[in-house]
Image (cartoon, rainbow, N blue to C red):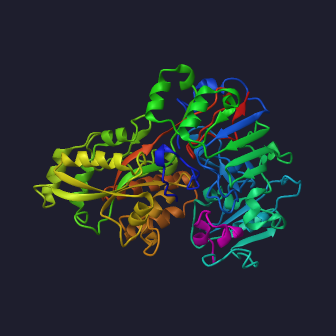
């Protein structure tokens, strides 16, 4: 589960998701990019340059959220499972990585067993063992290495109060390693999504003898196709070289064509796009994994066929929405919430965020991807421009025949997905339905604190949610599972919904280990919850990114929406 702040149309490091990993769907004009980028056989060798705005900070696998954000961690760290490195929907599937398969569940999905492939080695030639994977998972619990994904603290038996191996060297009894190639996980409750969770970097191996604690990120021991040559200023400049001990025979997902990968971060986004557009010298062999093209840049590029052929398109599993707190009047009245849903003009909202090239209008909370369980529905059909007349009817039924006045809380970050441009578009649309909207702008940190604290949560505010893996579980669970309401910390169940039927259905779906079957159930649950008008889905962001003119083999999956640096080749 990952709440992302995608300021300036930027999918940052997901880490969440992104995650993060930090952190988009089908690709290219058709598949990843224009066919020209994928013409001819990719060449092995050369140097790939990555030009990014946000540094890949905290490069320790225990502190990273996923290997998805920017894809850079996945070059160094292999995990029990990984995402399938393919374009579009095919990239939304989980695949074995260090493990021989995606996991063997017990009958009730509370015990998961994995076996390692033969011949796996670190960069120094020593063998990778399941004890090393167990150790990294335990490291992820250490307060000194905070920042990683929180799931295992909740999922593993007896892990809630564990403080990591530096304070408790006995380790987690919920993880067993009966031999060097077998690892067994014991869970508190059924989790059919466990193979998807096992793609996260806490499932990467770290040899205990090489652990340097907080300094491990500077020179981690590689299990992937590349090893770290240097890590300057906590990820600002990463240089990677080929790991001679990595074997393509045991890794069907990473192509690893370049000999060297040079990642430069902290660059201005406009400068990144200018350099990629010009493609001079080294920039011809460059890509970005976190800098989008804006509306003006896209308009310019659309008139240049050569540049247009170098734009990759991705759709990360993310939804921007209007959130309601039904404990605040008048949002306790479902007719009021329905009226607002009818009044929303998604066309003006989309335009406020850069237009239809950068956003897809949303009527479902789940993203429009089969892996999430996407089921098309619109409980309050008002077209793309809204239905003010229907909204007025509902307001009258709600006891507001002459309209009403509400407040809408938003982030003051201009250009942000919860920013003033979107808030103003909603204000103008609701005015046509007789609803006066007073805008309550808050500086980013204050906004985050206000909307995610139960005691201060406003009645209506802008929000967004992205999933750490493509499934309905990490999307619907944090937002609508009543047992995930947090009264003394960051709360994302904005409606504070605690419906036993919804909670029970979430538990039932979590027991399903067939992901396709589970997806259908998540879609049905999304539709059921959507009818309660607890949120108004607004749009799903679309990500457009340039790549250098000598880049080949562009792959952008539905899992991350980011160009996969493990697949790219240079001339």
Above or below, 124 against 277 in this view is below
- Is residue 82 highlighted in magenta? no
Relative to 405, 95 lies left or right: right
**Magenta residues, start to end:** 138-158
* Residue sitting at x 47%, y 52%: 520
Residue 50, position in %: x, y? 66, 40
Q: Residue furthest left?
A: 402
Tally the marks.
0
Q: Quadrant of residue 461?
A: bottom left
Above or below, 281 against 134 in this view is above
Whether residue 95 is visible, yes or no, is: no
Which quarter of the rendered picture does the C terminus lie within?
A: top right
* Residue sitting at x 45%, y 75%: 488
* Residue sitting at x 38%, y 53%: 412
Relative to 294, 46 lies left or right: right
- Is residue 155 highlighted in magenta? yes
Residue 121, position in %: x, y? 85, 54
Above or below, 565 against 200 in this view is above
Residue 531, position in %: x, y? 31, 56
Q: Quadrant of residue 401?
A: bottom left
Residue 301, position in %: x, y? 50, 26
Relative to 566, 397 lies left or right: left
Above or below, 356 against 476 in this view is above
Of residues 452 and 201, the one drawn nearer to the viewer in this rendering = 452
Whether residue 172 is visible, yes or no, is: yes
Q: Quadrant of residue 376?
A: top left
Of residues 4 and 106, the one drawn nearer to the viewer in this rendering = 4
């Amino acid at each position: 589960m990952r709440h992302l702040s995608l300021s300036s149309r930027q999918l940052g490091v997901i880490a969440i998701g992104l995650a993060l990993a930090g952190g988009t769907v089908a690709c290219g004009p058709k598949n990843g990019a224009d066919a020209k980028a994928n013409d001819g056989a990719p060449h092995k060798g050369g140097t790939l340059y990555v030009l990014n705005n946000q540094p890949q900070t905290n490069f320790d696998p225990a502190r990273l959220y996923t290997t998805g954000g920017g894809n850079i961690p996945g070059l160094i760290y292999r995990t029990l499972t990984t995402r399938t490195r393919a374009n579009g929907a095919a990239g939304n599937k989980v695949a074995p990585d260090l493990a021989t398969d995606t996991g063997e569940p017990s009958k009730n999905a509370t015990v998961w067993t994995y076996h390692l492939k033969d011949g796996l080695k670190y960069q120094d030639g020593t063998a990778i063992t399941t004890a090393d994977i167990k150790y990294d998972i335990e490291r992820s619990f250490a307060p000194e290495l905070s920042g990683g994904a929180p799931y295992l603290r909740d999922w593993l038996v007896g892990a809630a109060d564990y403080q990591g191996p530096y304070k408790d060297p006995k380790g987690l009894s919920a993880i067993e390693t009966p031999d060097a190639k077998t690892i067994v996980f014991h869970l508190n409750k059924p989790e059919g999504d466990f193979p998807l969770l096992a793609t996260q970097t806490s499932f990467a191996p770290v040899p205990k003898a090489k652990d340097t604690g907080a300094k491990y990120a500077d020179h981690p021991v590689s299990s992937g196709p590349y090893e770290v040559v240097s890590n300057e200023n906590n990820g600002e400049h990463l240089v990677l070289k080929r790991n001679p001990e990595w074997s393509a025979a045991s890794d069907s997902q990473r192509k690893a064509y370049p000999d060297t990968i040079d990642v430069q971060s902290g660059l201005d986004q406009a400068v990144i796009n200018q350099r990629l557009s010009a493609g001079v010298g080294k920039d011809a062999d460059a890509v970005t994994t976190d800098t989008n093209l804006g509306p003006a840049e896209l308009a310019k590029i659309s008139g240049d066929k050569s540049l247009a052929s170098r734009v990759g398109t991705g759709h990360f599993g993310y939804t921007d929405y209007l959130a309601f707190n039904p404990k605040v009047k008048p949002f306790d009245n479902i007719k009021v919430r329905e009226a607002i849903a009818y009044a929303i003009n998604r066309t003006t909202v989309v335009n406020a965020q850069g237009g239809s090239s950068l956003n897809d209008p949303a009527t479902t909370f789940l993203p429009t991807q089969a892996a999430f369980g996407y089921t098309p529905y619109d409980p309050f059909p008002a077209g793309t421009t809204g239905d003010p007349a229907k909204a007025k009817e509902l307001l009258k039924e709600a006891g507001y025949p002459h309209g009403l006045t509400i407040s809408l809380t938003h982030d003051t970050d201009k250009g942000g997905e919860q920013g003033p441009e979107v808030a103003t578009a909603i204000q103008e649309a609701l005015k046509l339905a007789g609803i006066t909207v007073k805008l309550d702008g808050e500086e980013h940190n204050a906004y985050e604190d206000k909307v995610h604290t139960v005691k201060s949560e406003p009645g209506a505010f802008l929000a967004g949610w992205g999933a750490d893996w493509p499934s309905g579980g990490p999307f619907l669970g944090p937002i609508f599972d009543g047992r995930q309401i947090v009264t003394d910390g960051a709360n994302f169940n904005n409606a504070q919904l605690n419906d036993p039927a919804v909670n029970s259905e979430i538990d039932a779906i979590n027991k399903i280990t067939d992901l396709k079957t589970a997806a259908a159930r998540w879609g049905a649950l999304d539709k059921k919850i959507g009818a309660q008008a607890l949120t108004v889905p607004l749009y799903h962001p679309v990500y457009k990114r340039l790549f250098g003119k000598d880049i080949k083999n562009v792959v952008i999956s539905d899992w991350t929406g980011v160009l996969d640096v493990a697949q790219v080749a240079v001339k």
